């Protein structure tokens, strides 16, 4: 039987962990880029960590849509990624991941890169769960034959 609370908690924890890992890796890149002089004042680090948690929730909570088999898969993907992407953009602007000082061209480039990362992460999870489902189906077919 489907346990929605357990699946929701698992999705949220995986999404928050992924967001935190990306935050740490990007922080390392910025620290190296600025020669060890990358600083976050006025609680910017705390705001960014809270932002990571919100992004994790923004992508983790809507992922339960994949359990709703009556909705076509493309629509489930649009709902999941649409909600997550909107939450991400709001948080990214609020905590300064997308600088207000960026030009229009820089902002478009930032959004394109961030969108590519979001789609890559989604694709990797899609592949993982598809492979898992295929293995389960293969075992069931072997058991029934």
Image: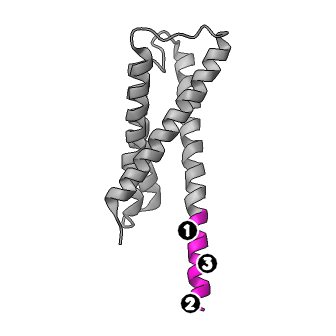
Task: Specify whether residue 79 is in view.
Answer: no
Residue 46, given in percent of the width and then of the height, sits at 40, 20
Contact? badges 3 and 2 (CB < 8 Å): no
- Residue 131 vs 11, above or below: the answer is below
Q: CA distance from mark 1 to mark 2?
A: 16 Å
Q: Mark 3 = which residue? A: 138
Kindly check if marks 1 and 3 are in contact, taking CB atoms under 8 A apart as contact: no
Q: CA distance from mark 1 to mark 3?
A: 9 Å
Describe the element under mark 2 as helix, strand or loop: helix
Q: Marks 3 and 2, Cα distance to the nearest angstrom?
A: 10 Å
Residue 30 against residue 122 in the figure, above or below: above
Query: Which residues are drawn in magenta?
Result: 131-145
Please name the residue that numbered disc 1 is placed on: 133
Up/down of 118 relative to 107, above or below? below
Q: Is residue 49 left or right of residue 145?
A: left
Q: Secondary structure at mark 1?
A: helix
Q: Is residue 116 left or right of residue 76?
A: right
Which colouring convention does the figure follow?
A: one colour
Q: Is residue 81 left or right of residue 27?
A: left
> For the point 60% across and 92% down, which residue is it?
145
96 inside magenta stretch: no
Residue at image location 60% in from the left, 79% down from the top: 139
Label 3 CA crowd tier, 10 Å (few <14, some 14–19, many 20+) = few
Q: Quadrant of the N terminus?
A: bottom left
Say which residue label 2 marks.
144
Disc 3 is placed on an element classified as helix
Q: Main secondary structure of the magenta part?
A: helix
């Amino acid at each position: 039987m489907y346990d929605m609370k357990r699946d929701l908690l698992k999705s949220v924890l995986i999404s928050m962990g992924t967001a935190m890992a990306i935050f740490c890796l990007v922080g390392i890149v910025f620290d190296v880029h600025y020669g060890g002089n990358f600083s976050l004042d006025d609680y910017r680090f705390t705001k960014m960590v809270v932002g990571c948690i919100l992004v994790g929730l923004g992508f983790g909570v809507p992922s339960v849509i994949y359990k709703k088999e009556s909705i076509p898969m493309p629509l489930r993907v649009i709902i999941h990624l649409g909600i997550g992407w909107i939450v991400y953009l709001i948080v990214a602007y609020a905590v300064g991941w997308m600088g207000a000082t960026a030009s229009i061209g820089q902002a478009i480039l930032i959004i394109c890169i961030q969108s590519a990362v979001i789609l890559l992460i989604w694709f990797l999870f899609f592949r993982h769960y598809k492979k898992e489902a295929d293995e389960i189906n293969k075992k069931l077919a072997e058991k029934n034959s």
